[in-house]
Every structure is written in C-alpha cells, then in structure tokens.
Image (cartoon, rainbow, N blue to C red):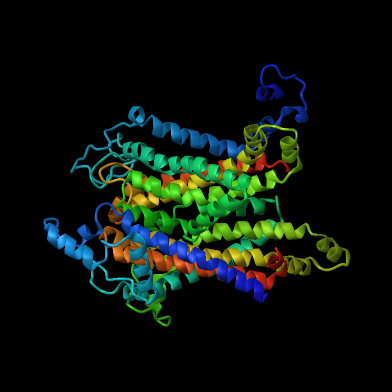
Amino acid sequence: MLGYVARRLLAAVPIALGVSVVCFALVHLAPGDPVQTLLPPDADAATVARLRELYGLDRPLPVQYAAWLGRVLAGDLGRSIATGRPVAEEIRRSLGNTVLLAGLSVLLAFSLAFVLGTVAGRWRGGWLDRLVTGVAVLGVSVPNYWLGIVLVIVFAVELMALPASGMAGDAFDPTSWDHLRHLVLPVVTLSMIPVGIIARTTRSAVSEAMNQEYVTTLRANGLPEWRVLRHVLKNAMPPVLAVMGLQFGTLMGGSILVETVFSWPGSGFLLSKAILARDVPVLQGTILVLAMIFVVTNLTVDLVQSSLDPRIRRA
Amino acid sequence: MSATAAHPPSAPVMAGPRQRGYWGNVAHRLRYDPVSLVFGALLILIVLAVAFAPLLAPFDPYQESIVRRLKPPGYQGRYLLGTDELGRDMLSRLLYGGRVTLLMGMLPVLVATLVGGGLGVLAGFAGGLINTLIMRTMDVFYAFPSVLLAVAISGAMGGGIVNGMIALTLVFVPPLCRIAETATTQVRNLDFVDAARATGAPLRLVLTHHVLGNVLGPILIYASSLVSVGIILASGLSFLGLGVKPPVPDWGLMLNALRQAIYVEPLICALPGIAILLTSMSMNMVSDGLRAAMDVRS
C-alpha cells in the first residue's frame, strides 16, 4: 500500500508541473504584449521597455517561468490589475464559498442519484429504469446556467419564495436562515449534472453487481431480497464514491457559470469578473489554484479507492 | 418492413441477421429503436432549420424597434415567439443564432476527433517513447475540469468565435486521444494483427484495415457524445461574453442578454435555453442509441 501511495504521489508531480506550465503560458496566449495591458495606449517606447525589464519580460521564457514558479510556490500570485490587491488574497477570500457550494451540491446529488441509480440498476429494463435513465440524460443535457435562470424565474420572480442572487453577507454563517435560503437555488442548479452522472454510474454498478454469482448464492440460501440488495450495494459502492469525489473536483472548477448566474461570491465568479475586466493575473492565479485542487482531488479519490479495493493497487 | 432496405441492391433478399454485416446490423437495430429515431429526426429538423435560416426566418434578425420590445409569443400574430430586449424577432434570432452555436459546438468535436483520434491511434500503435510523450502531455490537459480549461484558454486569448473554437478543440483532444489509445492498444495486442504483420501485410494496410476498422467505432460513439457537451460549453462561453460579440445572434449570448428581462417577460428569457436543451438532449439520445446499436455484445 505504501509503495502504491508513493508511486501515485510521484506520478502527480509531473502533472502538477505541466499544469503550472499551461497556466504560465496562458499569459502569453493573450494577444499583444502583456505590458500593454498595464499601460495606457499612448505610453512611449522607453516606458514600455522599463516596465518589461521590471517584470522580467525581456528575459528568456524558461527563466521567466522558473522565476514565476518560485514566486507561486512562495504563495505570491501577483496583484490584481482591477483592484490592486494580492491575487492570493482574492482567491483565499472566495474559495471557501465555492467549496461550500460544490460540497453541498455533490452531497445533494449523491443522495438523490444513489437512490435513483439503485432503483434503476436493481430493476434494469423496467419502467422505473427508463424513467431514471431519462432523468439522468436530462440532467447532463441541461445547460445549468439556463436552469439557474429558470429556477430564478419560478422561485424568485413568480413565487417570491427564495432570493435570486448573492450570499447575503461576506462570511457564510450556517445559523443564519437568510444565508441558508441564499444557498438553495445555486446548490440545486449545480447538482443537476452530477445527479445525471452519479445516477448513471450507480445504475451500471448495481446492475453489474446483481449479475454476480454470489447474488444467486445468497438468494438460494433464502436471504430476504433487501439483505441481498445490501450486499449488492456494498459491492457497487467503490466506483460510485470515486465518481462522487471526481465530481467535487469538477464542480470546484466548473461552477463559474452557475456562480455568474447567481452572483455567488466564489472563485468562479471571481474568474468571470477577471475575464470581463481582462485582469490577467487574477485569471491566471484562479485557474492555477482550481486546477491544482482538481489534481489533488483526483489523487485523493485514487488513494481512497485503492485503500477500499486492493485489486486496484495490483493493477 | 423488408430486410432489403439495409442492403446494397445485390445482396440476397432472404438474408438472415448473420449475412447483414456489421453496419447493416447497426442500421437494423437503430430502426427498431423508436426513441433514438424520434430524437434523431428532431436533431435533423433542428440542423435543417438552422441551416436554412435565411429562407425560414420571418424577419431580419438585426431589425430593432423601440415600440415592440419584449413582446410575448404570438404578438400581432406575426412575431410567433415574441421579441427580445431590443424589439428583434425571437424566432428569426433563434434560427440564425443556432448557426453560430451549432458551428461552435460541432466543429471543435470534428477537429478534435481527427487530431485526438489520430494522436491516440499513433500512441497506441507505436507504443514506447512516442506513447509516453503523447499520453503524458494529454494527462496535463486532463488535469483541468473541461469548463475551466475552455474558459481559461478562450479567456486568455481574448474571446471571439475562433478563439472559442480553438479552446473547445483543446478541451476535446485529450479524452478522444485517450479513448483511441486504449482501443488501439487493445486491438494491437490481438492475434489477428500479429498474423497480418507476420504474413507480410504492409503497415499501411494493417493500420487502415485491421486497426482503424476496429477502433473507429468507439471513437465515433465517444465523439458523438461530446457534441452535446460542445454545444453546452460553446453557449456557456458566449454566455460569459467569450463567444460572439453582439449584435450577432447566438443562443448563449441571447440567454445572457435576456437575463435582465426576467421580471418583464420570463418566457422569452427561457427560449434560447430551451433551444440549447432540445439540441443537446437529442444529440445525447442519438449518441446513446448509437452506442447501444453498435455494441456487438448486446
């Protein structure tokens, strides 16, 4: 087990480095000189050259990358062009809100999808299965930014039952009724895609487990059907848990559209504002942090799964 | 329903399922799958309607009017789906808007299928160092959630249709490459490929006949399932302001522009999203149907 953990950790290092190269390259994808975005358009050539030197932009790219990576590892992601504040601070302030949103969405999705997927997989081919499969396809086909708007129209505009956007404060307070009310629509919206994906995974895992020989043995031994199902679910669990973990990482990086619809003060909304303001340091820093979270989540899922199922370690 | 329709004219009339051939079997199974057929028809209808937008659109999609802003569907009996926030006919804008959305959603999948599929087959067939180089590079792009990668690249490049399509292509290359690589590696290790090479079949023939013939199916099925993601992501980019620029109609951009009007005419605001949903849903159902029909084991 220790050897496996060490191997997986080592394998993650080059990926993390690759991710940092991509994030570094993002700045150079931007049209024109990076300095141009910092200066007024009528700046003279001497000023441009001075600034290039100041930012080290006159040095070769590998040197620039090494210097940049050194600063990033020390926790310095540069300063926001729009607000002048350190990018790391902006991200720290918003990240918790995205973790909250993504975490609750995955939990909601799991509790819904696990029941749906189990029912579909247990009675595969029946009308319940068709219904669940239909719901799952709908879940992954709905553009969630549109679903968010529709939910706002129904629950905020027409019924006036829930707030349309924002978080009702700077720091989330779980005891505040108003804060919880602001969470409902974004969480439901963001959970739609994972519901579809987790339900599909559960369905195939359960129906595969139902075909195993031990099910026949259990039934032949006269075990009641609900206890047979308990054995089946235990065996179907690992892949479902893995998908659930992966979905958390995906939502962390993929909540940008839903956060924009609900003006939810998370890192996705920060990114979306940075894009509109052409605030490249914030764009770069946010993407780096979210991608790293995705890498770490995937690694964690991998390790947890292998500790649950020894067969994976041997593969 | 005669069995001859799926055959070339020379095929025997009394052919049983065994003589039909692989693609004949696929077509046969699809014909008895009403769900896939209905959604397939819907998809064709949408693509045709969008392609012939200039003939079908009742009004100029850019024609603004201050007096008929945000009118409900059926306004004056002429504006079937109402008008948007600048008084432009919604039906015409939806028809024209689909052109950008479908192009932005489908072309990247097509390019990525060629590039990613090609790289994957190369990696799987060559093995060794080439495999390691290609697949480890893909792993890096795999380390980004797809929405984030699309937003990152097109955001850094400054938005626009072309940049958006480049970003989406880069999002779709890694998964397609991985599918192609897995399928190729599996096929390469089968006995009939060794047999073909041992009997002196030229490499080109082994690749096109034995490898591609077995790998193309999984790649195409996977690519078809990506089209729906492509359409949703493309509209998402436009929604964030990274796709087309106003006043060009696009489903994602329309959805964003109409967000301000949810208190005035909520139904109009939901329309572009319904168009996206219908298209991506049909594409998903067709893709699922194809997957089932092409699965040899079933």
Q: Position of residue A124 (x, y in %)?
A: 70, 53
Whether residue A298 is visible here, answered yes or no, is no
Q: Nearer the viewer, residue A167 or B109?
A: B109
What's the residue at 71%, 70% (across, down)?
A310
Residue B72 image offset from top left, x and y in percent: 31, 44
What is the residue that sits farthest to the top in this orientation? B10
- Picture quarter with the N terminus of chain A: bottom right
Where the C terminus of chain A falls, by quadrant? Answer: bottom right
Q: Can you name the residue that lies furthest to the right here?
A: A221
Please provide percent x and percent y for residue A270: 33, 66
Tell me where residue A81 sits by quadrant. bottom left
Picture coordinates of residue A166 (x, y %)? 33, 69
A288 on left or right of B221: left
Q: Give the answer, above or below, for where B261 lies relative to B74.
A: below
Q: Is residue A107 above or below residue B262?
A: below
- A36 lies above or below B125: below
Q: Quadrant of residue A53?
A: bottom left
Q: Residue at x 83, y 68 (%)?
A: A223
Residue B275 or B206: which is nearer the viewer?
A: B206
Query: Is residue A94 rendered to the left or right of residue A296?
Result: left
Could you tell me if residue B197 is visible in this image? Answer: yes
